[in-house]
Amino acid sequence: MKTGFIGLGAMGSPMARHVHARGMLVVVGTRTQDKADAFAAELGVRAARSEQNFADCDVVALCVPLDVDVLENVAGLADVLRPGTVVIDHSTVSVDTARRAAAMCAAHGIGFIDAPVSGGVEGARNGKLSVMAGGDAAMLEKARVVLDCYAARISHMGATGSGQATKAVNQVLVAGINEAVCEGLALGEKLGLDAERLLPTLMAGAAANWFLDKRGATMLRDEFAPGFKNAHMLKDLRIVQAMAQQAGIRTTVIDQALADYSELVQDRGLGESDTSALITLKRAR
């Protein structure tokens, strides 16, 4: 299964490495050509200089930042990939973008799976991501051998766009948990509690969650090296808010998280920091 991978950021790079470890990676591309060249040279694969370099692939996976990036890449790939090839998009974008990308692929007989992921950089490095997939079941089965390289769970959520809809729900929960954990730990600091006792105590009870486990200790040490950047969370929350407003639900959690991450990114210049930097807002009074 000849596989190409586009997007070698914090998530895409380890995902591509897992594909290479299974002997399926043949070509990589990313926005910065030097980065693609170095990555390809390290692994002994081709570095793409245009979409044409992906023409011999059976599967091409994308993991890029923005909706426009997805549409630009898919438009280029649709012109060169063979009918029957599958494009897997691991980016977090709108449902509409997923459907537009799928339509572009379908016009050329190419399959498209919207397959955003959850599990953070740790999940990508460990090959333990949760993949939320939308699209044709047969195309998903064809792509599964690639997804298995870095997924702990692959869930077919329904038709095209269902993967992105599921990721929207995921991000509401993530944003709400982040708000609660950062606010709670900021309170713990103000009350003079010992972090080495507090964190394992919380993790042993009903308050236990992934964010507290993976980010609790580091945020209390003011260490905000990104697993998931504030700028990316802000982008996701804007997508989620539009979907939620269209659906007609109350958006209390989304609105608060959007306001907080807007402040972190736009006012405090912390777009490149981890989302756990939210605790710096919770401390301020």
Image (cartoon, helix red, strand yellow):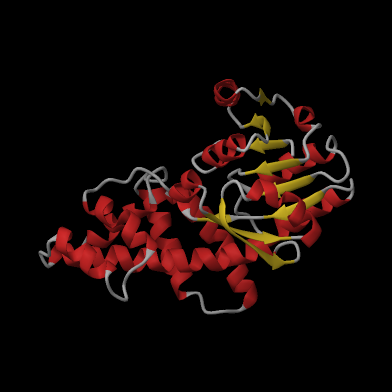
Residues 57 and 190: in front is 57
Most distant residue in the left direction: 192
Give the quarter of the figure containing the C terminus. bottom left
Task: Give how far across and how far down residue 182 sits, in percent.
Answer: 30, 62
Count of numbered tags? 0
Q: Is residue 228 above or below residue 135?
A: above
Q: In the rendered view, would you say 245 is above or below 141? A: below
**Residue 228 appears in view:** no
At x 61%, y 43%, the residue is 64
Q: Position of residue 250 (x, y in %)?
A: 52, 79
Q: Residue at x 81, y 44 (%)?
A: 85
Q: Residue at x 16, y 58 (%)?
A: 196
Q: Nearer the viewer, residue 177 or 17?
A: 17
Q: Which quadrant of the figure has residue 212?
A: bottom left
Q: Nearer the viewer, residue 129 or 10?
A: 129
Quarter of image, res 189: bottom left
Q: Is residue 266 left or right of residue 182?
A: right
- Please state if 208 lies on the left or on the right of 120 as rendered: left
The percent position of residue 128, horizontal first and vertical second, equals 51, 52
Instruction: Please provide percent x and percent y for residue 132.
Output: 62, 61
Query: Dividing the image into 4 quarters, which one contains the N terminus?
Result: top right
In this view of the protein, can residue 255 be seen by the observer?
Answer: yes
Farthest residue in the front direction? Answer: 22
> Relative to 35, does residue 207 appear above or below in the rendering?
below
Task: Locate residue 176: give its quadrant.
Answer: bottom left
